[in-house]
Amino acid sequence: MKFSELGLSEDILSAISKAGYETPTPIQEQTIMLALDGKDVIGQAQTGTGKTAAFGLPTLNKIDVNGGLQAIVIAPTRELAVQSQEELFRFGRDKGIKVRSVFGGASIEKQINALKSGAHVVVGTPGRMVDLIKRRALKLGDIETLILDEADEMLNMGFIDDLEFIIKATPAERQTLLFSATMPDAIKKIGVKFMKDPQHIKIVSKEMTSDLIDQYYIKTKEFEKFDVLTRLIDVQRPELAIIFGRTKRRVDEITRGLKLLGYRAEGIHGDLAQQKRLAVLRDFKNDNLDVLVATDVAARGLDISGVTHVYNYDITQDQESYVHRIGRTGRAGKSGLSITFVSNNEMGYLRAIERLTKKEMKGMKPPTREEAYQASLAVAFDDIKRDLTDPKISAKLEKFDEDAENLLAEYDAKLLVSLLLQAKVNDPDTRPKVEIAAEKPLPFNGEGGGRGGNRGGGNKRRGNYNRDRRGGGGGRNRDDRNKKDYYKKDKQKVHPKATEKKPGFVIRNKGDK
């Protein structure tokens, strides 16, 4: 089936064609026709399956451009809200549809002014939408379509009260489209309470059992992780890689360490300024970065193509989050690789992940320091040979001919080449020492899992929720506590090095006192 067979208007089809799409994905094919018929729909599918177009195309199709606000989309994160707004704008541009985004961490006054200038569709995070409704800047009395995107994630982040507040501010006679990767009881209750005979569309995710993603684990101690990570990057040479850390502090420290050692890396998490977050994602998508370091919440719902490697620096307590993580690679028929670092007492979580994905992870021996050195040396050789055979670069080197001859007359040629290689090779024996502050391993409950009622992340994600409501800032949450808080209990069960008092991030160079 093609988009032209779904019953969409010509201006919407024109935008789809300009975007280069011809064939709808399964979730789009099954959802669009139901939505065009005015049905309430619950769509269950993983990230990366085209859900934005699934709810966006039928919604845009029925928008009256001569009217006011007719549809809202509620999303869990700022990144997802901006991404959805951009995609909806692209599809609705030929029709003249105005799509606005509202979210915490940005000027609410500017967002109010944007709403005053006119909007047919508003995409936003729950906390900011509630603020705007209370200020009477966002009026939902004429809403015809209500869309909840990544509903399970919004519940995990503690948005249930805000969701109900927003839903109750919309007319009873409306169409509701709810999309969720999973279907916990709380989502089903929303369907019963706020939807009218919803049609349930479930798309079995290929991410769960994808043969295109090679999944490995490495048993490693906490204080060895960063060194193992850099050796893997040197040997595997990923085109684009995402590293997942459990906490914001972890993301910041990994990012600083990688940049210090010369890797093109940046990090994103909930406390990063919105402008910076969007700039980082733009650089990553445009190949200006090789490595993106992220928390689960910051990366949720991002549509990033071309990722070849996913490194789980910290294993996730929630098995379904693991599926979302590795789903960043192995897309569009391309192969991908995921590697998860795991300690001995976290093996239960790894086995629970295997049960969910129905795929056994293979153990991997990390590269040695010598293997990492040889890999970096090979890269340096390739770079030097490429530059020497490039006529444009060779022409620029002619200005150094006389200086080069003077150096050759004074020093041994082999010594000069060795100095060149030292500057280009990432040698594990001579580069600065980076230490990442220890994190407490996940508690093992004896059953190999942490997928409880809050999916193991309620308090942490509520911290992000509070920050969204306040537009930045935020109080201290579980993941922001310092190390001595982590190890107050059961110190005898923690590796001795973990209880040493260390600064969060230490770089030792020669000459340091």
Image: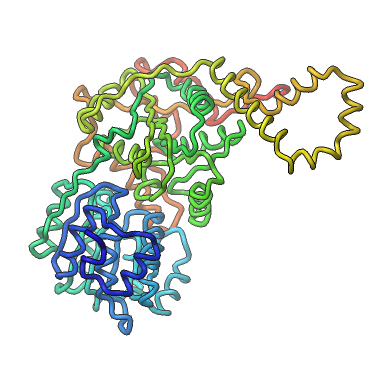
Viewer-proximal residue, 329 or 501? 329
**Looking at this view, is 386 or 291 the one in front?**
386
Name the side, left or right, on which 338 lies relative to 502: left
Q: Position of residue 410 (x, y in %)?
A: 91, 20
Q: Is residue 145 visible?
A: yes
Q: Residue 78 at what x, y percent from top left?
A: 40, 56
Up/down of 492 relative to 319, above or below: above
Please state which of residues 404 and 137 is positioned toward the viewer in this rendering.
404
Quadrant where the C terminus lies? top right
If the image is split into quadrants, where does the N terminus sit? Answer: bottom left
Query: Compared to 109, does 225 lie above or below?
Result: above
Q: Residue at x 24, y 58 (%)?
A: 28
Indicate the position of residue 330 as horizontal and vertical percent values: 35, 38
Residue pushed farthest bottom?
A: 66
Left-right relation of 449 to 387: left
Tell me if residue 513 can be seen. Answer: no
Side of 14 relative to 429 (left or right): left
Residue 132 occupies quadrant:
bottom left
Seen in the picture, residue 216 relative to 291 is either above or below; the reply is above
Residue at 49%, 33% in the rendered image = 238
